[in-house]
Amino acid sequence: MKKKLKTLVVTMLIVAIAVSCCGCITGRIYGKPLDEATALDVSQGVLYLEQITVYMQEHDLESIQKMGYHYGKAGAAEFDDFWQDYLDLEEEYGAITDRNLSESYSYADCPAFVGELITESGATLMLQMYFSASYELYRLHIYLSAEDAEAKVSMPEDVTEIDVVLNEGGEFELPGKITLPAGAMEEGKPLTAAVLVGGDGANTMDMDAGNTHMYRDLAWDLAQQGIVTLRFDKRTLVWSDVALDENADISVFTVDWEYIDDANAAAAMLAELPYVDAENIWYIGHSQGAQMAARADEEAGGLYAGFVLINTSPRNWAEVIYDQYINYGLCDRDYDQIYYLVSKIDTEKKFILEGSCAKMREDEMTTTFILSRAAGFWVDYMSYDYVQGLKDLAKPTLILQGEADYQITREVDFTAWEQELEGCAWASLQCFEGLNHLMTPSGGVFEGHYKEFDIPGCVPEAVGEAIASFMGQ
């Protein structure tokens, strides 16, 4: 029974952590919950998809606008953007020849649909449609399908990648990639390097989320700026079965096990490369992985030249997780469940912040999960002051924030960084308008919801350029 219970709880843990990183929790409690559409709405969606695509084929803008696309200047500008996107796609891939309704939802109690539009070239366009409850057209968004978009993506010719094994021969081997400027190995000139550390969750080395690949994009961009990077799959992805073992040691539920051991192993691997400047290796982290930077540096004996922290928070992570549950993590529950769960997670947050996890027996620390984490993790996490660690080290630190991130927010978390680091000459902060938690453009009908990651998106080159400039490249 104990094994079954622990397996269930840890499975919930892995899912919860993954969704907290990638946004895969539906909607917001007081925002936009996403539910299945009724049969009537589905039939209406088929009709409206047919009608709108006919108007698109005929270039009949007026008829589309008469369907209700009218809510001031912002709506007009958005429609203009939609229409220009469509014209560009039509020019590249040809006219629409067929259509199919692929997804139907009730989004904030209003019907929302996604249609697949087949073009003359055989490419597929995705059309998002959002209506009022009385079927006035609110929003339209069109983009190239993920499969067709990915087929256009290739590694730049001036970039080289090498597959490696992190911790090779050790207990927890992980697949990884070294990305470097083409020709760097032959030139022999020592280059600046960086370790890319993933956020909380079972993340791949590319930080795949929906149809975005944040760390792949960043690695390619940084290589073009003359910077070597090493990225790797997380232990929570490759070795998840270790955490599911009913006899798992408490060391599995630690910051070291999830983040620091592998980050520092990657940095050590970089330091051994003849084309890397061992005195100029940086720590680049995302979300909770970013928060670990100072602690990783201390455990590595000061190995890192500096830190780049992307979409993270100076607040205790229990507060961050609590806010994520409250803001969007419970909307698929009914009101009675929400009332109970809000009370429960509030109690759990206080339990963590008061240090009560440390008072538990060791066997309880590995089997009791609080805010989706083992109690033992919180004991280890609470043993270090991550913001004070940065201040004590006073190494060059760049804080990057996606202004449209609904998980680590501009209003709460980035503002907290501005207050914490005021007067710290070694720190620089930069916010990128319109970028989400994975530093890709936020948009579409499902903007501010995990489904926005359905839209294929790349990290803008400006992000890599800002990082490279801060590193002195």
Image: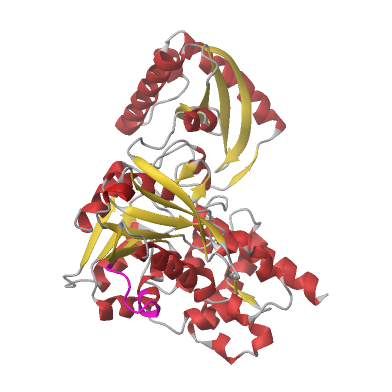
Splitting the image into 4 quarters, where does residue 443 fall?
top left
Residue 161 falls inside the magenta stretch: no
Q: Is residue 459 left or right of residue 117?
A: left
Percent x, y of residue 458: 40, 40
Residue 101 vs residue 181, the one in the foreground: 181
Splitting the image into 4 quarters, where does residue 235 fall?
bottom right
Residue at 19%, 70% (x, y): give it: 426
Q: How is the image coloured?
A: secondary structure
The magenta segment: 297-306
Percent x, y of residue 365: 63, 83
Give the residue furthest to the top: 58
Q: Is residue 440 left or right of residue 256?
A: left
Is residue 64 visible from the viewing direction of this image? yes
Is residue 440 visible from the viewing direction of this image? no
Residue at 39%, 25% (x, y): give it: 82
As displayed, is residue 185 above or below residue 151? Answer: below
As displayed, is residue 238 above or below residue 446? Answer: below
Residue 302 falls inside the magenta stretch: yes
Splitting the image into 4 quarters, where does residue 274 fall?
bottom left
Residue at 33%, 76% (x, y): give it: 387
Percent x, y of residue 432: 29, 49
Residue at 31%, 80% (x, y): give it: 388
